[in-house]
Image (cartoon, grey):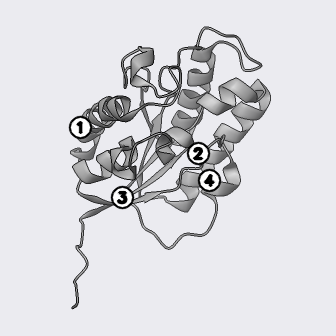
């Protein structure tokens, strides 16, 4: 037997933390990343790492892939466990490195999605300040910002742990909302 690989028109790289990795999806295909890649009929390279924060070195590693688009979904772990200064510096450097490594790709920054404990104040500040750091760093690198706050319903029932990681139901909301947010930008000439 032999097979011919399916050639897709687009290639997407997805950077992110455990949410992008698909943590707590019943099967990998249920993650928002897998659903998004399928909906876009694209080749997908998921470079997400559970527990990760903005790590500029990840964006500067050599890569033979020539993506058409890149999504970056960091910030929630930075807000909950890093200092403001480190988060700002690393977010700025990460987006600058992505832009330099992939100058022709459309880059999309997804601000952190809802989490049930977003009322806390951390070393970064309130949750909205964490989102603003993402917006500012993305804008400085010419990335398009996609607001993550409305991607999933603000209900513990759409999260497997009741506060942060989407379950299959939550991933479906996330994938559909992100697809709808991306499409107008992908149709632009």
Residue 101 lies, with reference to residue 180, above or below; the image says below
Q: Residue at x 50, y 38 (%)?
A: 19
Q: Closer to the camera, 149 or 106?
A: 149
Which residue extends farthest top?
119
- Residue that label 3 marks: 68
Q: Is residue 92 left or right of residue 23?
A: right
Residue 45 lies, with reference to residue 119, above or below; the image says below
The answer for how far apart the CA atoms under marks 2 and 1 are is 22 Å
- Residue that label 1 marks: 184
Tell me if label 2 and label 1 are in contact, CB under 8 Å. no
Among numbered discs 1 and 4, the one appearing first in the sequence = 4
Task: Locate residue 188, reporting x and y percent.
Answer: 23, 44
Among numbered discs 2 and 1, the one appearing first in the sequence = 2
The answer for how far apart the CA atoms under marks 3 and 1 are is 15 Å
Q: Residue 97 has which mark?
A: 4
- Residue that label 2 marks: 95
Q: Is residue 20 left or right of residue 6?
A: right
Task: Locate residue 29, reporting x and y percent.
Answer: 34, 51
Q: Quadrant of residue 60?
A: bottom right
The answer for how far apart the CA atoms under marks 2 and 3 are is 16 Å
Q: Closer to the camera, 89 or 152?
A: 152
Q: Is residue 40 left or right of residue 69?
A: left
Q: At numbered mark 1, what does the secondary structure look like: helix, strand or loop?
A: helix
Q: Residue 48 has which mark?
A: none
Among numbered discs 2 and 3, the one appearing first in the sequence = 3
């Amino acid at each position: 037997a032999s097979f011919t690989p399916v050639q897709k028109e687009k290639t997407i790289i997805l950077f992110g933390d455990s949410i992008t990795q698909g943590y707590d999806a019943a099967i990998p295909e249920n993650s928002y990343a897998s659903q998004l890649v399928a909906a876009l009929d694209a080749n997908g390279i998921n470079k997400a790492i559970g527990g990760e924060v903005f790590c500029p070195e990840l964006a500067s590693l050599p890569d033979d892939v020539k993506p058409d688009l890149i999504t970056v979904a960091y910030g929630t772990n930075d807000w909950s466990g890093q200092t403001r200064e480190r988060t700002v510096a690393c977010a700025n450097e990460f987006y600058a490195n992505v832009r330099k490594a992939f100058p022709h790709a459309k880059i999309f920054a997804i601000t952190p999605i809802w989490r049930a404990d977003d009322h806390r104040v951390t070393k970064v500040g309130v949750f909205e300040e964490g989102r603003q750091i993402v917006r500012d760093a993305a804008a400085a690198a010419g990335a398009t910002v996609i607001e993550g706050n409305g991607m999933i319903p603000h209900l513990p029932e759409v999260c497997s742990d009741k506060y942060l990681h989407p379950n299959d139901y939550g991933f479906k909301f996330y994938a559909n909302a992100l697809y709808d947010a991306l499409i107008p930008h992908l149709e632009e000439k």
